Amino acid sequence: MAVTATGLAHWLPEASAAPLRETTLGALLAERAAALPGRPALIFDEPQARATWTYAELDAEVTRLAKALLGHGIGPGQRVAVMAANCPEWVFLEYALGRIGAVLVTVNPSFRQGELDYLLRQARVSALFVAGVFRGFDVGAMLAEMLPGLNRGRPSSGSYGGSAYPDLRLVVQIGAAAVPGALPFNGVLEAAPEISEAALAEVAQGVRPEDVLQIQYTSGTTGKPKGAMLTHRGTINNALLAAERAGYRETDVMVSAMPLFHTAGCVCNVMGMLAAGGCLVMMADFDAGRLLDLIERHGGTITNGVPTMYIRMLQDPGLVAGARDLSRWRIAYTGGTSIPPQVMLDLHARVGCEPVIIMGMTECSPIITQTAPDEPLETRVMTAGVPLPHVEIRIVDPVSGETRPVGAEGELQIRGFLVTAGYFDMAKQTRETISADGWLKSGDLAVMDAEGHLRIIGRIKDMLIRGGENIYPVEIEDWLMQHPAIAEAQVVGVPDPEFGEEIFAFVVLHPGKTLEGGALRDWCRTRIARHKVPRHIAFIEATPKTANGKVRKVDLRRMAEEMLEKDTTA
């Protein structure tokens, strides 16, 4: 289906597409296990731990964990947070929670106390599965401060968090690093025999496709993260349709380090391979050389990564020397930021894999548009493709709401099965984002051509994307403003050749106060995740403002780029 014949930038859903699947994540895994029992489904390959699960073995692990969760009182609708780097337990939990109708709340493992505190409260989390250490940071010690009752053992009644977190009744340690007082993951599994197969089946049969599968937190201009509720129906069909368009096969092996706490990991990777019946080779963290090693070792045919990852892979000495066997690598999947066309052209020229570029957002489960493999290479690397089947988009005037002509700039809006069920416990923000007739306002400025290809040219929302991470300046500004020396803080994004964008903070100090950039970064690192710490900091006397007192961020961006240009030419 093409854009409407009126010359307006409005893409109608493809009428010829196969009907949407009405199923749940647990049911789809059971379906694949019955059809492909001996086919490898999941490989975790790290120097300290290597393991493979077939579809039958994965389904058995998920069944055991699902029964154990029920044995610990976790049931339909309850929200369970997972805070860990990529690991097998993360995948087991994703499936098991889906099978019993509980809601997975994804947590960035680099979160610090303030960020985790907000999420546990706002989502009213009942259980927290957590790794004790992440990139050298002692998460267990942080939890000991947040949950003083945790190391006194599991409460017979009430919660670990008392009045601060009244819903939190279970804390489970993932991995070997200590979380004092938490129940070990294997200890959770001991409850599995308490639940019969019939009892699990009864619960699983009650889970509906329209039920919420997971809550993914995404910030906005208010600065308060919002929990986008993604359904079984939305995520499963998103994965199925994206996999079909990209040409995934049952024999495919995807190698990726995309974090599972992102939709790129838990939907595009986990559910994308489930959709095809393929195998996911999962890395705990990204390393260009190791990823290429795994492609060679496991015969990888698909990769999923942000452009920064592909840039580093192209710099690998073995790849540069032509000494790697990457002959089975067929598809390079990417999105999450502006895609440098030359990077994907270089990858195609040197490896032979075909680029597949997507445009997505968390609230859309996540993929909205995707390139088609039968189009010319130049077209594929220059745009974000056309909408997936069953997806409707339009480009509107942000002020009047009128649909813009083809080729004109406007706000991208989306409607269809993929749109979030709303923000958890935030009715006002939901109404502001999703219209009564189902249109989701993306906040992105976009252009659609006559064939429906989408290009994102900017953002109405004040957001930047660093190495595929969505970063919301107002959240960083709120943290900076807590520093006793700072009177005002404004954050903008600036172009960066490696990460796409970098964080530039403008800081106005209180009279008589002094502060250095290095000291401020050190202060930030103890309070916010590493990827949110400003790389560039400028101390100024005052920020530019409009006549009515609003900060002119367009001027700040220009100032930042001029400062960086001056530094590079000095």
Image: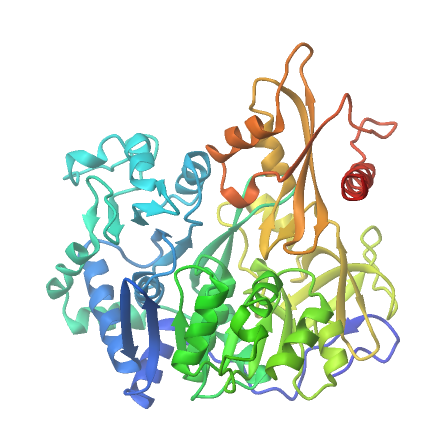
Question: Is 95 on the left or on the right of 291, as rendered?
Answer: left
Describe the colour scheme in one phrase. Answer: rainbow
Q: Residue at x 52, y 87 (%)?
A: 327
Can residue 309 be seen from the camera position used here? Answer: yes
Residue 389 visible? The answer is: no
| Picture coordinates of residue 62, whole percent (x, y) | 26, 70
* Residue sticking out furthest to the top: 512
- Quarter of the image for residue 140 reads top left
Q: Judge whether 84 appears above or below 151 on screen.
A: below
Which residue occupies the foreground of this view, 147 or 328? 328
Position of residue 389 measured from the top left corner of the image (x, y, whole percent): 63, 80
Instruction: Pick the quarter of the image with the N terminus.
Output: bottom right
- Percent of width and height locating residue 540: 75, 25
**Quadrant where the image shows the C terminus:** top right
Vertical placement of 241 versus 505: above or below? Answer: below
Q: Quadrant of residue 367?
A: bottom right
Is residue 109 toward the left or the right of residue 224 in the image?
left
* Above or below, 95 relative to 181: below
* Depth check, front residue: 267 or 504: 504
The mark total stands at 0
Residue at the (36%, 53%) spot, across then down: 84
Please state which of residues 201 and 250 is positioned toward the viewer in this rendering. 250
